[in-house]
Image (tube, helix red, strand yellow):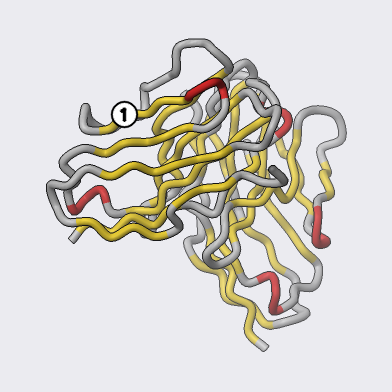
Amino acid sequence: GAGVSQSPSNKVTEKGKDVELRCDPISGHTALYWYRQSLGQGLEFLIYFQGNSAPDKSGLPSDRFSAERTGGSVSTLTIQRTQQEDSAVYLCASSLDTRTVYGYTFGSGTRLTVV
Amino acid sequence: AQSVTQLDSQVPVFEEAPVELRCNYSSSVSVYLFWYVQYPNQGLQLLLKYLSGSTLVKGINGFEAEFNKSQTSFHLRKPSVHISDTAEYFCAVSEGGSYIPTFGRGTSLIVHP
């Protein structure tokens, strides 16, 4: 597609429920990133995929968070047993490759509210 | 390890006035530097980037930034702002060879008529 597409744009869930957030990167972009943006905070790196290599999960805040990327394209971020502190905007970005010289193209994000 | 400090969380300014958004970074190696803009309810959009060469970088929408290695700074400037420039601005740094840039906390630019 023309840009990075994220769905849903908004998600309200009850504490303890699982949620899945989807990211559809730009066609041909091999690198895909997930970030979390909390109110008043910068962007917190969560996880990074590059092609078929093992993902860099160093930013995931707990084992309740996981992500996968199928076929080197679409990615799903899953949060299990959601907590109120998980409320944030989850941003996905993609890039041509691992070299950050290109900069990233970001999606519009998914605003997650845990009540 | 790389880190980024955006010194101002909020910068109010009147329309047509000049503005500077400050960014300082910490790194012991060569870096790539970026400024992104986030309009309300949208994702981040790349404004400009410094990779190498000329320290003065020009970006979209009339913005420019200057890389100052001795000051470890990469301040963003615009000589005359518009109402439409009201947005959140993020500075990011990536150490050479690092795949994962570090973002600052953002500066909210508020342009008043």
At which x and y percent is residue B53?
85, 29
Mark 1 highlights which residue?
A66
Q: Residue at x 81, y 55 (%)?
A: B60
At which x and y percent is residue A27?
69, 33
Q: Residue furthest bottom?
A: B113
At which x and y percent is residue B46?
69, 47
Label 1: chain letter: A
Mark 1 crowd level (few <14, some 14–19, many ≥20, 10 Å Cα): some
Q: Residue furthest top?
A: A53
**Is residue B81 positioned above or below A112 on the image?**
below
Is A113 left, or right, of B8 in this rendering?
A: left
- Find numbered disc 1 in the image and state the secondary structure of the residue it sits on: strand
Q: Residue at x 46, y 50 (%)?
A: A7
Q: Quadrant of the C terminus of chain B?
A: bottom right
**Is residue A99 positioned above or below A21 on the image?**
above
Q: Quadrant of residue B80?
A: bottom right
